[in-house]
Image: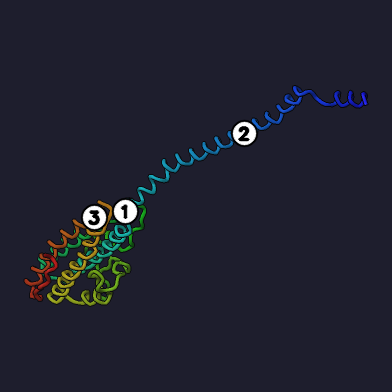
Amino acid sequence: MTRQHSTTEETTPPSGDTAGEAAPPSAYGLGRRLRIMGAVLAGGLAVTLALLLWLGVFVPAKQEAAGYSDADSSYAATAIEHNAQAVQLAALAPGRSDDDAVLALAVEVGEASAGRVRLLADWLEARDIPVPPSGREALALAENGLETELPDDGSGPRAGSTAHSHEGGNHGMLTDEQVNGIAALTATDFDIALLAALVEHHYGGLQPADEEIENGKDAEAMALAQAEADAIRVEVEDVRDLLASVGGPGSTNDQTS
């Protein structure tokens, strides 16, 4: 009995030793917590760096892209094609008209329209938006002085096959057939047909410009639309006056008011 009791006492650690052996688990737990905290801090640093990258790179790019709307880019592309066809129509005059006033007005309309194409193309290019091919073709035609040799078939110069890709009746755009019909004429018949087409064409150009002024987001695009609308309202009156002077029908269209 005594020996067994003694053995029990020898193998049973004192209370002080029991407390001492509890330290390793506590140290392990502390180390584990430190490692977890380190991982959390590292993760937080990664998140912070990612946030800084987002704020420094992606957000400005996104904000820049959000500076214009679909309405702005659609207006620019539509107005380029519209003005490109005006350049094309103006380039029909040399070799067909023998009226100095008509020839001079054709140059004015062609140069003004080409200038608008250039401004709109610059706006698109600054935003990495493709410029309609008709715009570049119209600019090339204008750079040639709006005077090109007449093809053998008499159909006249073209800004390119895409210069009038919209269907006729869509903001004043003419169909290929309508353009070819004008190109087949000469002298007074041509003058009347060209000027009448320009009147309707100009009126049609007011629609996309006015829509951009009302619904656009980009200030520069809206300013271009306003400038175009103002110019159209002046130009169309000159065309109408000349149309009347060459014996064409008078116009009662009041859309310029």
Q: Residues within 10 Å of mark 3 (few under 14, many from 20)?
A: many
The quadrant of the rendering that contains the C terminus is: bottom left
- In space, the residues marked 2 and 1 are separated at their CA atoms by 51 Å
The three-letter code of the residue at mark 2 reads Arg
Q: Is residue 196 visible?
A: yes
Residue 38, image quadrant: top right
For marks 3 and 1, give the CA distance. Answer: 10 Å
Which quadrant, please, contains the N terminus? top right
Mark 2 or 1, nearer chain start: 2
Residues packed near mark 2 inside 10 Å, few (<14), some (14 to 19) or many (20 plus): few
- Residue 247 horizontal/vertical position (percent): 7, 75
Q: Nearer the viewer, residue 189 or 32?
A: 32
Q: Give the residue type at disc 1.
A: Tyr
Q: Earlier in the sequence, mark 2 or mark 3?
A: 2
Q: CA distance from mark 2 to mark 3?
A: 60 Å
Q: Are marks 3 and 1 in contact (CB under 8 Å)?
A: no
Residue of label 1: 68
The residue type indicated by label 3 comes to Met
Secondary structure under tag 3 reads helix
Residue, disc 3: 222
Q: Residue under label 2, please give it.
A: 33
Regarding residue 154, the answer to whether it shows in the image is: no
How far from the left and from the top, in percent, is residue 175?
Answer: 27, 74
In front here: 178 or 188?
178
Is the C-beta separation of discs 2 and 1 under 8 Å? Answer: no
